[in-house]
Image (tube, rainbow, N blue to C red):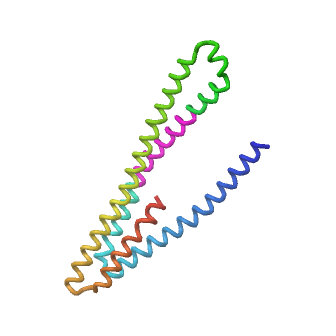
Amino acid sequence: GEMIERVDGDVGKLENFLSQFVVQVVLNGLLLLGVLVLLALIDWRVGLPSAVSVLLAAGSARLLSRRLASYSTRERQARAELFGLLEERLSGTEDIRANGAVGYVLRRHIERSRQLFHASVARAAWGVLTWRSLNTAITVGGILSLIIGARLALDGTISVGQVYLIFAYTNMLIRPVEELM
């Protein structure tokens, strides 16, 4: 009964995730496209840096996420090994004490804990690196768009209100890029 509930619950969670995932991808894609079009409508020179930054963010996320996935797999493996060891040893506590193997069991536990710690730190570091690279690419594109917009406003090509729109639109790029990647 417990196993059936577990499988049935997992299928329900997977179905919910996949249905939400498709909606989120479509909505974030439309938001990205809309913002880039609006920036290009203000002036193509304003839209270009933001479009390039989105492409760079997507490329860097694709490269870094592969590495991140391998570190996540290592972390899950280390966690499974640690909890497998704990489960085995806890069920045989009396035998371990009777045979004088407490020191051995503790050393194995420390070994597995160390492996999990190192795997978790590596995964977290790559996660932060991936996230920061996305934010940096989008921020640099936004700054360049804003500088170009300010220059165009000083030349009288666009208004100060449009410069504010550039600022607002480029800030809107960060969330969908993070969620899509």
As for residue 75 lying within the magenta part, the answer is: yes
Q: Position of residue 53 (x, y in %)?
A: 34, 64
Q: Would residue 155 appear left or right of 17 to someone viewing this image?
A: left
Q: Would residue 63 appear left or right of 13 to someone viewing this image?
A: left
Q: Quadrant of residue 150?
A: bottom left
What span is in magenta?
A: 61-80
Q: Position of residue 5 (x, y in %)?
A: 75, 47
Viewer-proximal residue, 160 or 15?
A: 160
* Residue drawn at point x = 59 percent, y = 13 percent: 100
Viewer-proximal residue, 6 or 38?
A: 6
As for residue 23 lying within the magenta part, the answer is: no
Helix, strand or loop: magenta stretch: helix
In what quadrant of the picture does the N terminus appear?
Answer: top right
Q: Quadrant of residue 166?
A: bottom left
Q: Is residue 6 above or below residue 19?
A: above
Q: Is residue 143 above or below residue 85?
A: below
Name the residue at the left extreme.
155
Name the residue at the top extreme.
99
* Residue drawn at point x = 28 percent, y = 76 percent: 45
Q: Position of residue 106 (x, y in %)?
A: 53, 23
Q: Is residue 106 above or below residue 175?
A: above
Q: Would residue 133 appear left or right of 96 to someone viewing this image?
A: left
